[in-house]
Image (cartoon, rainbow, N blue to C red):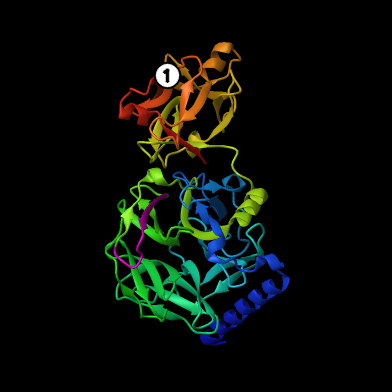
């Protein structure tokens, strides 16, 4: 069968799948209007520094503000591929015109990027609480990869486009498959990677990575036609290596957020920008204090959802039973134990589970809290000679008192949290030279001391 017929056959299959979902989906699955979106869902895969926490399945997280995320299903995958490499990277979630979802992903498990693969993974889902009609889609027959697929709806064509990264034999390009058309190329004349498309009124935005200088850029077009996009932003980068841009329209307020996935100097750290004018070159970097990504998350996708959809996702998959504590004044650092010493360190680090805490009622007073290690449930964070360490609970009243803290409004920011010692009530949990201890902190203390004693509790 000629290549053109293969692509057309895929197009018919996609149209059939959409029809089948419409026929079986409940009436409530009709597409919500933008005004009803009050939350967000993120899809991602996980990859830890050592690889032990890597899981090349589809993970989900939810957020009410699009910045601070709650991973679902204990940060375990909600679905994994059963064909091809049996692993995925770079997932993308698209709400279709009928209100249901399609999930696309790169067919690749691990980090061997040398093998060509013409396929991507795909699932259908009514509301992301279950996934059906798993298949692999062949997008071309070239001796190249098919990476980072994303999809958009082109109202002028009445078709869905799947845009992905490939190599045309000369350079890395973006290619697009329409449901009834052949492969076409957006080619700015230099190597590119990781396209994301946002349709915003009469303007269509395409953000991408330029492999020549390593920056993220935005391009725009009024038509969505191939080669009709013109780059209009200056280069954007935080860190020394960044890729996988995501552009998200805020549900309220008119702002947009741009996310990028770092791979250098550390792997698996998201950076973000905000703008109140996406049509201008006016992206402002966000302080990491403003957002918290899911643990070990890589190359994400973000879609707006309704409050009811968020509730169903939390009910179906559950919120984590553990928490992480982020430092207020060093927001890339998290409370962890290392060699049984309490400290704050910049993530990623291994074992990554050193930062996961089960927050339980206080051992000395249930009105307070105690921090139990997720991986060693006999050990708690406690102070000894005012220094914090991870010790096994000996059952004594002294241990219980040392391991109990009262959560208060954050001393540096009331939207965050501070923790006052149970048995030394003038002292608060804080870091000094990145090591945890309890010290006196009061309203008259310095701003630096208050910031050292302020943390964000989340997952």
Task: Point out residue 417 in the picture as x, y percentages from the top left corner.
Answer: 46, 32
**Residue identified by numbered label 1:** 427
- In this picture, is 445 found above or below 130? above
What is the magenta range? 269-281
- In this picture, is 386 found above or below 226? above
Nearest the eye: 412 or 110: 412
Task: Point out residue 424 in the picture as x, y percentages from the top left corner.
Answer: 46, 15
170 horizontally vs 113: left or right: left
- In this picture, is 134 found above or below 382? below
State how many labels appear: 1
5 horizontally vs 246: left or right: right
Residue occupying image coordinates x 52% and y 54%: 45
Residue 322 sits inside the magenta stretch: no
Q: Residues within 10 Å of mark 1 (few under 14, many from 20)?
A: many
Residue occupying image coordinates x 43% and y 58%: 253
Residue occupying image coordinates x 66% and y 77%: 19
Task: Point out residue 263 in the picture as x, y percentages from the top left corner.
Answer: 37, 52
Is any part of residue 183 visible from this angle?
yes
Is any part of residue 142 visible from this angle?
no
**Quarter of the N terminus within the rendering:** bottom right
234 horizontally vs 142: left or right: left
- Quadrant for residue 122, please give it: bottom right
Residue 280 sits inside the magenta stretch: yes
Nearest the eye: 228 or 90: 228
């Amino acid at each position: 069968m000629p290549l053109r017929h293969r692509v057309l056959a895929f197009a018919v299959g996609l149209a059939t799948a959409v029809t089948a979902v419409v026929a079986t989906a409940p009436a409530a699955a009709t597409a919500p209007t933008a005004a009803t979106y009050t939350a967000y869902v993120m899809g991602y895969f996980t990859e830890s520094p050592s690889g032990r926490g890597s899981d090349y399945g589809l993970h989900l997280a939810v957020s009410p503000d699009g910045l601070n995320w709650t991973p679902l299903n204990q940060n375990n995958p909600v679905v994994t591929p059963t064909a091809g490499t049996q692993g995925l990277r770079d997932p993308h979630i698209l709400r279709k015109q009928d209100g249901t979802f399609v999930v696309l992903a790169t067919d690749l498990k691990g980090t061997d990027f040398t093998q060509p693969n013409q396929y991507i993974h795909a699932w259908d889902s009514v509301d992301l609480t279950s996934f059906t009609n798993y298949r692999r889609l062949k997008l071309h027959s070239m001796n190249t990869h098919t990476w980072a697929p994303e999809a958009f709806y082109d109202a002028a064509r009445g078709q869905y486009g799947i845009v992905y990264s490939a190599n045309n034999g000369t350079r890395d390009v973006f290619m697009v498959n329409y449901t009834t058309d052949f492969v076409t190329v957006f080619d700015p004349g230099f190597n590119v990677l990781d396209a994301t498309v946002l349709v915003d009124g009469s303007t269509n935005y395409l953000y991408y990575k330029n492999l020549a200088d390593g920056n993220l850029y935005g391009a725009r077009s009024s038509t969505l036609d191939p080669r009709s996009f013109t780059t209009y932003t200056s280069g954007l980068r935080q860190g020394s290596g960044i890729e996988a841009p995501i552009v998200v329209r805020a549900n309220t307020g008119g702002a947009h957020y741009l996310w990028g996935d770092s791979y250098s100097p550390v792997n698996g750290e998201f950076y973000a920008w905000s703008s109140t004018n996406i049509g201008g070159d006016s992206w402002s970097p966000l302080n990491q204090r403003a957002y918290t990504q899911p643990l070990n998350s890589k190359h994400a996708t973000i879609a707006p959802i309704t409050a009811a959809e968020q509730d169903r996702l939390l009910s179906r998959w559950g919120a984590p039973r553990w928490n992480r504590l982020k430092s207020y004044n060093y927001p890339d650092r998290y409370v962890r134990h290392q060699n049984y010493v309490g400290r704050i360190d910049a993530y990623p680090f291994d074992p990554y589970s050193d930062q996961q805490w089960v927050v339980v009622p206080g051992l000395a007073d249930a009105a307070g809290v105690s921090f139990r290690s997720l991986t060693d449930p006999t050990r708690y964070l406690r102070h000894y000679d005012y220094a914090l360490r991870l010790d096994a609970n000996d059952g004594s009243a002294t241990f219980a008192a040392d391991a109990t803290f009262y959560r208060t409004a954050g001393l540096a920011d009331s939207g965050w949290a501070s923790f006052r010692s149970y048995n030394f009530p003038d002292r608060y949990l804080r870091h000094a030279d990145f090591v945890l201890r309890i010290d006196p902190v009061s309203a008259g203390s310095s701003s630096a001391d208050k910031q050292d004693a302020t943390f964000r509790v989340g997952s």
